[in-house]
Each structure stands twice: as structure tokens, then as C-alpha cells.
Image (cartoon, coloured by chain):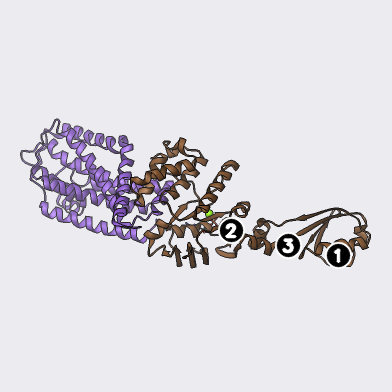
Amino acid sequence: MVTLKTQIIGTWTLLKKELLRFWRVAFQTVAAPVITGILYLLIFSHVLDSRLEVYEGVPYSAFLIPGLIMMSLLQNAFSNSSSSLIQAKVMGNIVFLLLTPLSYLQLFFAFLAASIARGIFVGVCIYLIAIIYIDLPIEHPWFLFLFALLGGGLMGAFGIIAGVWCERFDQMAAFGNFVIMPLSMLSGVFYSIHSLPVAWQGISQLNPFFYMIDGFRFGFFGKSDVSPYFSLGVVALFFIVLSFITIRMLKSGFKLRN
Amino acid sequence: MKPAIVYRNVKKNYGTVKAVNGISLSIPQGEFFGLLGPNGAGKSTMINMLGGLANPSSGKISVMGRDVQKEYQEARHLVGIVPQELVFDPFFNVREMLRFQAGYFGKSRENDRWVDEVIDRLDLRDKANTNMRALSGGMKRRALIAQALVHRPPVIVLDEPTAGVDVELRQKLWSFIKELNKEGHTIVLTTHYLEEAEALCNSVAMLRLGKIVALDTTRNLLKKFSTKNLMLRLNFMAKKSLPQSVKNFSYVESDGAYIFQLKNITDIAEITEALKKSKIEIIDMQTLDTDLENVFLKLTGAK
Ligand SMILES: Nc1ncnc2c1ncn2[C@@H]1O[C@H](COP(=O)(O)OP(=O)(O)O)[C@@H](O)[C@H]1O
Ligand SMILES: [Mg+2]
């Protein structure tokens, strides 16, 4: 009745459904964030290109791209799992999932994988459009891959937590506006933290988004504000902690099976 | 043979509300079982705990011997639940929904033929490629039932399946559910339409405030509570000179119509004899049956 095969099919079915769910509305879930990212790029690079050089020999517009890609990746990974769950809860169709034999681990993996997929897909789109008119090296592809995967996973897990926790759309919106938005804006997407006053540098270093973006940028330029290995460690640690919390939450049935 | 469903001293509290307050119940396989009770009696809560939508505060529930918490994966394979609320996923059409649902249960593409059969049997074929959002209420209800069947569960539980559907669809659903029962599925149905339970169920449990107030076969329950009533329309003489032997029966009178509560069918003879002796003419005579509704009202004290 319950075999490895049924478990794999079950998980894959949920992943497929989650992918289709955002793909069906790709206009909102892919096109919109890609356009936002490109707009940031156009405006900031146009205004600041001639005036700023963060790393020697790296034009500001090139410096900006990795941060924008990572920021969009993170926001979209979060958005995928959180909006899927909150919609299913508000519409009530979450029961269809809860009535199945899918285990908490299967739910976790499927939602997480879909989040990572959407985040990376949006990131790749921005990258492909950006390199049409801006030169961008790739020094360490493995770092790019690891940071994209861990960052997407971290935010996918965070999205699951938010989706399970929130009961209404406005709570979810508050989550986005008061947690995700400030963290991503104050993460060094638009600047190197070395250009900040010392106090702000310290505060930035408490922000996990900073390490995701700084490490990701290292993958392109081979330069970063802090050691990429340290960043990788921080991101991996956050990913593990958030995953652990998410799994515990799903296992307990918190807010879902009540 | 293991019972299809067992509740053992199950309780569920929502804050201070005792939604289910100590229920023990065993439903044999092949049964067509009715769970009756007024709104708020705890029917849906019982069903939700069975399907894992809510965890019991205490007690144990099993499906075909599988504990719904410890062996939840096996238990959920064995039961198909049709929720009370008309919920749907607005992103997909009927066939996609059903295939996804089967997939969650680990069914591979070979199951697609069964999905199409379910679609046909519920008359959903014309709507199979229609987005769930665009379906009428009745069609949504059918799709909801179909969703509970895609993984071929031996036990099927329907929470108020005919609430808010028109008469025609209700008849169709009734005969469909009867068919499923004939094919060997155990059926549990909650309803507050008593005619539904009377027409379909072999056994019923009546619920009130989270407790079972009666549990028996539908027939026994009717027998137990069928205080048959005799309605007599008598001529004017009755008002003045109703004999004491007749007055001893409990009765109510209005406008020359007397309704006697009978304990025994022989009571009828006794009453008519006594009336004849007193020369009171019987103008009209009728017996009134008790239906489940009356039993229900008596037991649950509902209005
Ligand atoms: N999720 C919930 N939170 C709080 N109270 C609930 C919840 N679900 C049901 N109840 C309460 O439990 C009682 C039983 O409800 P329910 O099982 O839906 O009854 P029925 O299905 O028989 O109409 C009611 O008093 C209801 O208000
Ligand atoms: Mg109910």
C-alpha cells in the first residue's frame, strides 16, 4: 500500500502541481519580478555607473547584477511556498493535501523544490536579459550554484513557515513588507557594506541576506566583502535551522491539522 | 473481519468547546452508516479526525485496523473523505485535479483509466476539461465526491453530501452512493436530512453535543421509538361522555380530532370497543407513523 514507489510518485506529483501552479500564472510569477529586476538595473546603473566603482575594474552596473539576481531569487522562492500555502488555506483546498498519505517530509521537499525552481528560474531570466548589454564574468560557477540552491532553499523553507503561520492575506502581506523587503533592501544589493558607516556595517552583518548576496557575488567576480566560505557556512547554517523548524512545524500539524 | 472504522473514547476540544466528548463507535465493513445530528453536534469534527484534518485531544481512531495517527499513511489510503465545504483549487480543471489527487496517493498513470471512469460515473465528462472555478455548485459537489474516490478507498465518508443540492442531483447521488455500497464499499454519511438517513442507512448514530445519544439499526430505532398514533374524528357526543377507559390513554384533542398515543396495536381495538359501547360515533380514523424525524427530535431535543 505504502511503498517507496508510491512515496516518490506522491512527492513528484505535488512538486509537479506546485510548478504548474506558478507556471500557469507566469505573467505574475515570472514576468513581473523579471521586469522589476531589469528596471532596477536600468535606473541604478544609468544614474550611478559613471560615479561609482565598488570593486576595482568592475563597473557599477556589473556589480549590481548579481545582487539583483539573488534578491529576486530569494523573494520569489519565498513567494512561491508562502503564497501557495496561504491561498490553499484561505480557499480551503488545503484539505486535499491533508487528506493524502503525504508525510510531512514529502510536503517539505515538494514545496521546497518548487520554491527553489521558481527562484532560480526568475534569477536565470534576469541574468540572460542583463548579459545582453552588460559584460559579466563567472569566476566560480560552483559558488553560484551553491548559493542559489541554499538561498532558494532557505527562503522556500521560510515561505513554508510563513504560509503555515499566517491565516489571512493581509498577515502575509505584512510579512513581506516588514520582514522580507527590509532584509533584502538592507543586504548590500546596491552597495558594498564597506561604503557604510561602521555601525551600519555591523548591523548588516547580522542580516542573512547579506551573506547570500555577498557570496553569490563572489561567484561572479571572485571578490567579496567577507570570505565566501564564511558566507557559505552562515547560509548553510540558516538553511539547516529553518528547515528543522519547518519540518517540526509540519510534523506537529501546527495550524494545519486543527 | 476487522471493523471498517473504530472510535475509542475519542474527545476533541476547541478551547472550551467540547466538539466531540467521548465517543466510542465501531462500524463494520460493508455497512451503510449514518451519522445524524443537528448543526454543531460534532459530526464534521468526527470525520475530520478520521481523515487527519484534526488531531483528537484524546482517544484512538482506526480505519480497517490502522491507527489514523500512528499509521496515518496506511489509514489514509483506506479512506476517501468528501468534505462538507465546497472547496476547490482554482488553478486546475476537473481531470487535472483528479489526476493530481490520485498521484498524491502514489497512483501512477495506469490509474488514469479509473479516473476517467469516476468522471463518467459522476456525469462529469462534459466538464472534465473545465476549470474548477467555472463549475456550478452541483458540479463542484460531484467533483468533490470524485476526488475522494480516485485512490479506490474501501471506506468512503461523505460529510453532508447533499447539503444545498437540488432534488434531482440528490436522487442521483443517492443512487450512486447506494451502488458504491453494493459494490462492497463501507459508506459513512453525515446528514441532518432524516429522510436521507431513513432512505439509505442500515444503521445510524445520533449525535448531540459531541455525544452519541442513540446507536442502532435504522429499523430498530424506528421500532423502539415508534409510538404509533391513532387519530380519530368523533361526533359531538365525545365531548360530554368520553368513557374513562378511553380517557386513560394519553391523548390530545382539538376540534373533535383526538390523537391517541398507542403502546400496542391492540390498543386500537380497546379504544374503538369502548367508544362503541358509549355510542360515540367514529367519523374518521387514521394511524400516523413515526419517522426518524420524530425519533430524532425526541432524542436530541432539537427544535
Ligand atoms: N476549527 C474549529 N475551531 C473552533 N471550534 C470548532 C471548530 N470546528 C468545529 N468547532 C465547534 O465544534 C462544534 C462541532 O462542530 P461540527 O463538528 O462542525 O458540527 P456538525 O458538523 O455536527 O455541524 C461546534 O460547536 C463548532 O462550533
Ligand atoms: Mg458539519
Q: Are marks 2 and 3 in contact (CB under 8 Å)?
A: no
Name the spot of residue A94 as percent of width and height, x first: 40, 50
Q: Is residue B150 left or right of residue B159?
A: left
Q: How would you rate the neighbour count of disc 3 (Cα within 10 Å): few for under 14, some for 14-19, many for 20 or more?
A: some
Q: Is residue B57 visible?
A: no
State the image quarter where residue A230 is shown.
bottom left
Instruction: Give the Cα distance between marks 2 and 3.
Output: 21 Å
Q: Which residue is mark 2?
A: B202
Labels 2 and 3 positioned on one and the same chain: yes
Labelled pair 2, 1 in contact (Cβ < 8 Å): no
Q: Is residue B12 left or right of residue B206?
A: left
The label shown at residue B246 is 1
In the picture, one chain is purple; tell me its letter: A
Left or right, A70 with respect to A168, comes to: left
Picture layout, residue A150 above or below residue B221? above
Q: Quadrant of residue A135?
A: top left
Q: Amino acid at mark 2?
A: Asn
The residue to which callout 3 is attached is: B227
Eye-nearest disc, 2 or 3 = 2
The picture places residue A84, in percent across and down from the top left corner, at 35, 46
Chain under label 1? Answer: B
